[in-house]
Image (cartoon, rainbow, N blue to C red):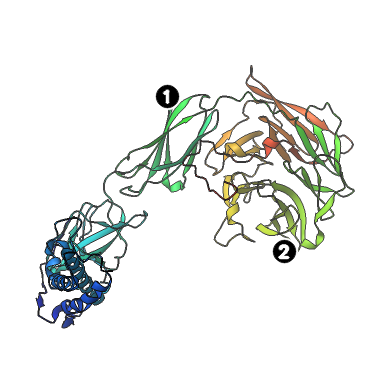
Amino acid sequence: LCHVHIKTEVIMRKVYKLWIFIVIQAVTGVRTLVPLPDFESQCETRCPLQNQTEDGHGDVGCGPECKIKQCARGCELWQSALETSCQVVCNGTQELLPLKELYCVMGCNDAVNRYFHELRELIGTPPPPALVADTLTATSLSLEWDGPRFANISYLVQWRYEEIADTWQYCRNQSWGPHSTVQVENLQPYTKYRFRIALLLSPHHSEPIVSEPSLVISTLPGGAPASPPTIVRATAADPTRVSVSWEPGPFPHGPILSYVLQICELPQGYTALKDIPASENKDFYMFQNLAPSQNYSVSVSMRNAIGLGPPATTFVTTPAYSQVKETQQLILILGAQHTVISQAADLLDDPVVMYKTTHHIKGVAVHVRRELLFVSDSSRMVWVTSAREYTTPRPLLAVGNNITPHDLSVDWLNDQLYVLGLADSSALWQVIRCGLDGSGITVAVAGFVTKPHHMEVDPYNGYLFWVIQGPVGGGLYRLDLADISNGVKHEVIPDQILSSPHLGAFTVDHTSFRILVPNQLENTVVAVSLDGHEVTDIRSNTQQPQFHNVISLAMANGLFYWTNGERVLTEEYHAGQDSYFHNLVYTDAAKPSFVSISVNLPSSQPVPVPVNPPTAVQAVLGSHIA
């Protein structure tokens, strides 16, 4: 550390027998004479009290009078102890002091502590330092300080990063100049700091007195980034994709222009490079078209106007293609005009009616784990019944809630139901949510002039998605579930992650972090990343596709099931031709009006689990459980 004394206007301390006078120059420039108590006399007055703390068993070699005398001797030596220590001035050379030296040290410490206490009261909290104009560079600056100054006190500059949780540290390179200024060097470029002045009252005693911190001071840009970003997570989403997310590093040394991502197959092989502009505010990327059962290195670097910084690197292994098939039979839940039926996808079993009504069904949703089926109809009611067998439905939401319900979607992780409906009061469409018993109704998002074509909640990733059709505002939208608080906060605007007027009903591939949505104009299905930055056509190899009019869409075992309102269709993959073919699954010529399709499989409503092995696991132990 650099202990530097201010050399200008040094204020000398004069010691008298009964009083110590300290001359202070205040901020106003007026000099005042402040008397300090006679610490030596106060200390000697307490020496008999120091003796009373003993029980008399340790008097060998130093009786009561000896102890008082040695204590008084320590009181006389307190000023000398400021430069060394009380043990030194009392001739204490052993770690375990004899009684004489011990009482001398006790008296000395009492006087020194009184002096420091009085000095702290006198000085108070000094003012903060300030930046000297025209001295700021990328790595150095000058500070000026108008605090009180004393002789025999060291003044050191301390610094702290403003945007990094850190403690105050002493500047290693500082030099005081004239007019109470100090030059501070070896700083990081383009970094926010705070500074303060530490007053060391004595080289060997007490904590320093510190000034108020300065305002935030940011150094100028200079040089390439000095630190790598922090990789928050890198994991294989599936056998052919790796996702990576990151945070910026602490020392970019200038405005970040882009993040440079690289993936390399190990030991050698496929390599891909991606430059993501910082203006996109993106901290997530998905590498695609990788090989299964391979080791990859993933690195992320920051780039500024000067150059590229050091990379943060981690390693990821893609899993093999799963050989485990869904053991449970695939059951389709089909919502028609007046009935909801449960139909095995292989059509070997007869369909089972799960719900029937004379009203027109508007929306259907299933909670797989709780085996609950939710239905909305033209009676302006939402009903709940069993998803396993036919039982008498019971009302969940009634007409009195001032909304005409349509589409339904289940949050299976938080046991909530999302309802898209027409608000009676405003004639505008909105999405509300409630508990599985109909309680706790909350407006999630409101103000739709036209009905969204499709709505679905994704509790796995924490979003609500919907599609608007048409040339005005047409596209795929996303709302963070954390921004729902009985109506969207005024400052929160839903994100349009894909702009297109021709999107159909979609499904969410939760564990792969993407939305699968038909582009009905192109007659295909595209995979859209959660932030909308990656859009990939995943059905360009379909023979005679039939995605022109998708009312409802579901996926199971990598294959789509959907309805156009008249028929229920699925697809079949031929590995030899690397092509998909469409097949008819179900039709009802008498009542051809289908409104929804769902799959009754646990894999369709996954529960999040750690993808990478947990680290730093801790346990909380109770009296009976851990």
For this view, does 137 lie left or right of residue 617?
left
Front one among 481 and 255: 481
Q: Which mark is first along the chain, 2 or 1?
A: 1
| Disc 1 from disc 2: Cα separation | 60 Å
Q: Determine the image quadrant of residue 585.
A: top right
- Is residue 590 shown above or below 383? above
Q: Determine the image quadrant of residue 577.
A: top right
- Is residue 12 shown above or below 542? below
Are the residues at dot 1 and dot 2 in contact (C-beta closer than 8 Å)?
A: no
For this view, does 40 lie left or right of residue 214?
left
Residue 132 in sight in this render: no
Front one among 230 and 477: 230
Return the mark for residue 426: 2
Front one among 566 and 619: 619
Per the image, the residue denoted by label 1 is 266
For this view, does 450 lie left or right of residue 203?
right
Q: Residues within 10 Å of mark 2 (few under 14, many from 20)?
A: few
Q: Secondary structure at mark 2?
A: loop
For this view, does 225 lie left or right of residue 494?
left
Return the mark for residue 102: none
